[in-house]
Image (spheres, rainbow, N blue to C red):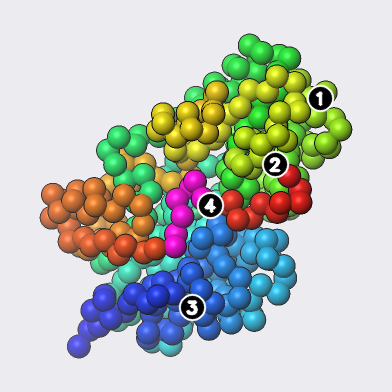
């Protein structure tokens, strides 16, 4: 008899588990064999026996945790089928951050897609999401409310550049997550024609260098030296979100505080962060992207991992798609992602 989807993927305290292949997906605690969708710290953790992920995700994990982050590693080439016990897996681009992938699992005639985090808007720093027809689509739901409709990222960049022109003597301090958002913002600024140096807080340096090593053109991104902060009037400075609120940021000339996050759509959050210039730039799908993606996969069943699960499950019901919330704990939304990767000593 063909295995049921709930037998192919089960829920364990460590996260989703495939008994036939004997592996966990984005496990929260150390396991024997982990398949990892992308390098954000809530999905990619150190201490597993073996890790299978894209080459870029492995490089990101090594940059964050050190070369010995796992007992052994194997790089998954995009699209290449890999046999693991009784199932076949395949990594397909997810469009979230560099190296991010959906993981396709096939057992007999049943195909499940675990999408990890994803977005559909083009991002110059990573490969675009590819919809894969499947029986069961496992999706995040970070921004799964109809109110979430992310604006055009280029329009948000134009707001930042407009402010820089308007206040040529003020430093523009932009809070961004260290993996993905920082590099995407730099790439978007370059695409908009901004060719001056973009200054980086030390905590953003390593992953930005990694993106450059992977061939992503980001231009001149010098590190901010503590003593030169007073001279950076008119400059754009990127730092981790926490640093934007700290004393570190106050040493710049009359700083304009900006944050780039999907959460900036929520006014209360922007206010709470003290964001003078909230930029709505998200690496997660908004409501329209989530529902379009579910339709494109043709899945008869949808499992919702984390975020605003109820609204998406309800919407699936109205479309005649079976859906259930997994209530997976331990996966942060964008507001937490990357925070753990900011070493205190570079602040
Ligand atoms: Zn993520
Ligand atoms: Zn996540």
Which stretch is magenta? 330-337
- Residue 36 falls left or right of residue 7: right
Sequence-first tag of 2 and 3: 3
Q: Is mark 3 within 8 Å of ligand 1?
A: no
Quadrant in the picture for residue 145: top left
For image coordinates 44% across by 59% down, the residue present is 331
Q: Residues within 10 Å of mark 1 (few under 14, many from 20)?
A: few
Question: Do the residues bearing badges 4 and 3 touch, measured as CB atoms within 8 Å?
Answer: no
Up the image or down, 31 lies above or below 120; here it is below
- Alpha-carbon distance for marks 1 and 3? 54 Å
Q: Position of residue 38 (x, y in %)?
A: 53, 60
Question: Could you tell me if residue 280 is visible in this image?
Answer: no
- Name the mark on residue 230: 1
For image coordinates 43% across by 46% down, the residue present is 284
Kind of element beneath mark 2:
loop
Circle nearer the viewer, 2 or 1: 1
Per the image, the residue denoted by label 3 is 82
- Alpha-carbon distance for marks 2 and 3? 32 Å
- Name the mark on residue 217: 2
For image coordinates 70% across by 34% down, the residue present is 247
Circle nearer the viewer, 4 or 3: 4
- Residue 23 falls left or right of residue 161: left
Q: Position of residue 183 (x, y in %)?
A: 63, 43
Sequence-first tag of 4 and 1: 1
Q: Residues within 10 Å of mark 2 (few under 14, many from 20)?
A: some
Name the dominant secondary structure of the magenta segment: loop
């Amino acid at each position: 008899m063909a295995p049921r989807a709930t037998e192919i993927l089960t829920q364990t305290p460590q996260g989703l588990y495939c008994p036939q292949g004997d592996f966990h997906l984005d496990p929260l605690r150390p396991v024997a064999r982990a398949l990892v969708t992308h390098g954000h710290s809530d999905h990619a953790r150190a201490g597993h026996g073996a890790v299978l992920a894209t080459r870029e995700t492995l490089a990101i994990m090594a940059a964050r945790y050190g070369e010995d982050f796992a007992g052994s590693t194997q790089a998954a080439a995009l699209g290449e089928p890999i046999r693991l016990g009784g199932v076949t897996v395949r990594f397909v681009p997810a469009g979230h951050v560099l190296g991010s992938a959906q993981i396709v699992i096939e057992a007999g005639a049943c195909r499940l897609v675990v999408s990890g985090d994803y977005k559909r808007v083009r991002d110059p720093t990573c490969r675009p999401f590819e919809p894969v027809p499947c029986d069961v689509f496992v999706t995040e739901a970070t921004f799964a409310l109809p109110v979430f409709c992310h604006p055009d990222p280029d329009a948000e960049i134009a707001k930042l550049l407009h402010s820089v022109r308007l206040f040529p003597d003020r430093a523009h301090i932009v809070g961004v997550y260290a993996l993905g958002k920082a590099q995407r913002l730099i790439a978007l600024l370059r695409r908009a024609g901004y060719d001056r140096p973009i200054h980086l807080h030390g905590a953003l340096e390593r992953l930005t260098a990694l993106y450059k090593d992977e061939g992503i053109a980001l231009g001149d991104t010098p590190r901010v030296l503590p003593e030169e902060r007073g001279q950076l009037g008119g400059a754009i400075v990127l730092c981790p979100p926490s640093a934007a609120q700290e004393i570190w940021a106050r040493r710049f000339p009359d700083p304009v505080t900006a944050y780039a996050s999907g959460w900036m759509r929520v006014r209360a959050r922007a206010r709470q962060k003290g964001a003078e210039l909230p930029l709505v730039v998200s690496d997660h799908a908004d409501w329209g992207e989530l529902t379009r993606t579910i339709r494109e996969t043709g899945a008869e069943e949808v499992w919702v991992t984390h975020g605003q699960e109820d609204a998406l499950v309800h919407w699936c019901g109205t479309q005649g798609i079976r859906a259930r919330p997994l209530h997976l704990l331990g996966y942060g939304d964008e507001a937490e992602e990357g925070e753990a990767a900011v070493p205190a000593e570079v602040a």
